Amino acid sequence: MKMHAVLASVALALAGSAFAAGDKHDHAHEHKPLHGGVVVEVKDMDYELVAKPTAIQLYLRDHGKPADVSKASAKVTLLTGAEKQEVELKPAGDKLEATGSFKVGPGTKAVAVVTVGGKPATARFTVK
């Protein structure tokens, strides 16, 4: 009787780990744009880049919840064809932002180096 209990426990343990291994994401949030931008995930943080000709905005979500960007900073490098533009983003409410004149459009590549709490992270985007 004891042997059956041990085998049942082992079978349940293996079934649970096999189920968990099949799911790449073990968290409950989705990686959809909430502000009309492009979303990438880096180290459990979602970065949403909204790139317009007059503003570059970067929203950060930690496990689906807006991250505190009040002490964050970012430097975004925009690559459009052969043109390169570097932009410093500063906190602006719930996002990091820069305003001005930017050459962005479908296919523009963007590399953001974001520093939050003294820890840098790099996120790469392709504007749609």
Image: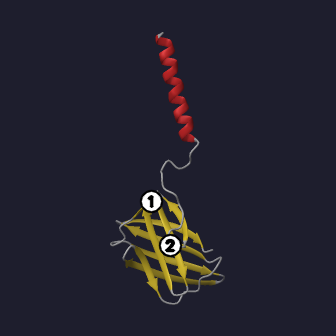
Element under label 2?
A: loop
Q: Earlier in the sequence, mark 2 or mark 1?
A: 2
Percent of width and height locating residue 95 = 41, 74
Q: Residues within 10 Å of mark 2 (few under 14, many from 20)?
A: few
Q: Amino acid at mark 1?
A: Gly
Q: Position of residue 42 (x, y in %)?
A: 50, 60
| Badge number at residue 40 | none
Say if 116 sits above or below 81 in the image. above
Q: Look at the numbered disc 1 and give the secondary structure of its residue.
A: loop
Residue most extreme to the top: 1
**At label 2, which amino acid type do we have?**
His
Report x, y in % for residue 67: 38, 65
Q: Is residue 104 above or below residue 71?
A: below
Q: Residues within 10 Å of mark 1 (few under 14, many from 20)?
A: some
> According to the image, label 1 marks what residue?
64
The residue that label 2 is drawn on is 35
Where does the C terminus fall, quadrant-wise? Answer: bottom right
Task: Answer with the quarter of the image where residue 72 lies.
Answer: bottom left
Residue at (60% x, 79% y) in the render = 79
Q: Position of residue 40 (x, y in %)?
A: 54, 64
- Relative to residue 88, is residue 69 depicted above or below? above
Q: CA distance from mark 2 to mark 1?
A: 14 Å
Is 115 in front, or is 30?
30
- The residue at 53%/40% (across/down) is 20
